[in-house]
Image: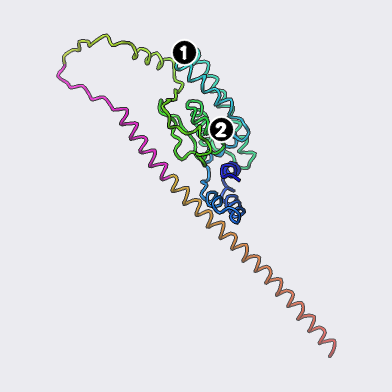
Amino acid sequence: MEFAEVARELLLVAPADFVRERTARQRAVRKDDRALATRIGGLRKPAPAAWVVDLLAHEGALDEAVDLGPAIRQAQADADPAAIRQLRQQRGAVVTALAQAGADLASHAGHPATSAVLDQVRATIEAAMTDPHAGAAVRSGLLVRPLESAGFEAVDLDGALADPDAVPDAWSGTDAEPIPITSARRTREASRASRPDPGPRAEPESEEQPTPAADPAAERRAAREAESVARSESRDADAALDAAESDLEAAEDHRSDLERQLAEATAAVGRAERTRDEAEAASDRAR
């Protein structure tokens, strides 16, 4: 059995039951395929929002949203305000409907999603519309963390998939830039900015020096570095939580064994006491 297939099945398990199911599946395959067992043991528990998106992907509910992406990007590239406005409305309706569907699936699975989780679900679906690589990622059913679209930057898929090799279309190492859907006003501003420069204009003299403009590229780099650190800390926290849950599961198994041994010992004591009472009664009758 391929790891991606096992991962898809495990990622559909409610987060509260994930560690137990992962351990059971790992033990089941360890004898026949130790390499697969090792990969299963290293599978990260999905974030709640990623779990909800995986549920939607399993139902095939994300196809319409992802298929809407090319139309949105084309309207943006054509600078067509009317088409953009219509597609934005359509996008909003699709995202809202999918978030509700995800909430229903989560509730049916016994793990209701909070409003914060559903906000991340919406952001992930919107990211899937803006970037074709993100679209492939959310349709794969292998998502372990939510996604977010940040302006004209490609959606960051680092650490987002349980098995990146199983979803080659999600690899974002391409020169094609995703085009997010934005307001018609921003589109017009971009169009004006692309016109030929009419030449320098006379500026009024002033003793004050102009304030240096902020460096957007530097700000984006700093934001990405901060996000990378946060993701690393989140992964470490996930690993610590998984280890603690594994320890708890082992402790509960040990407790169950002790409780079973106690019950057996109690039953044995009861049987011995009954045997003793019967022997004493027989002795009294003999006397």
Q: To which residue does mark 1 refer?
A: 81
Q: Quadrant of residue 67?
A: top right
User: At x 53% / y 53%, what residue is drawn?
Assistant: 245
Residue 71 in the image: above or below residue 53: above
Q: Which stretch appears magenta?
A: 206-233
Density class for disc 2 (Cα within 10 Å; few <14, some 14-19, many ≥20) is many
Residue in front for this viewpoint, 195 or 233: 195
Does 219 appear in magenta? yes
Front of the two marks 2 and 1: 2
Would residue 188 be found to the left or right of residue 257 on screen?
left
Would residue 264 be found to the left or right of residue 243 on screen?
right
Total numbered badges shown on the rendered structure: 2
x, y percent for residue 41 = 53, 51
Residue 1 in the image: above or below residue 63: below
User: At x 20% / y 12%, what residue is drawn?
Assistant: 203
The secondary element bearing badge 2 is classed as helix
Q: To which residue does mark 2 refer?
A: 139
Density class for disc 1 (Cα within 10 Å; few <14, some 14-19, many ≥20) is some
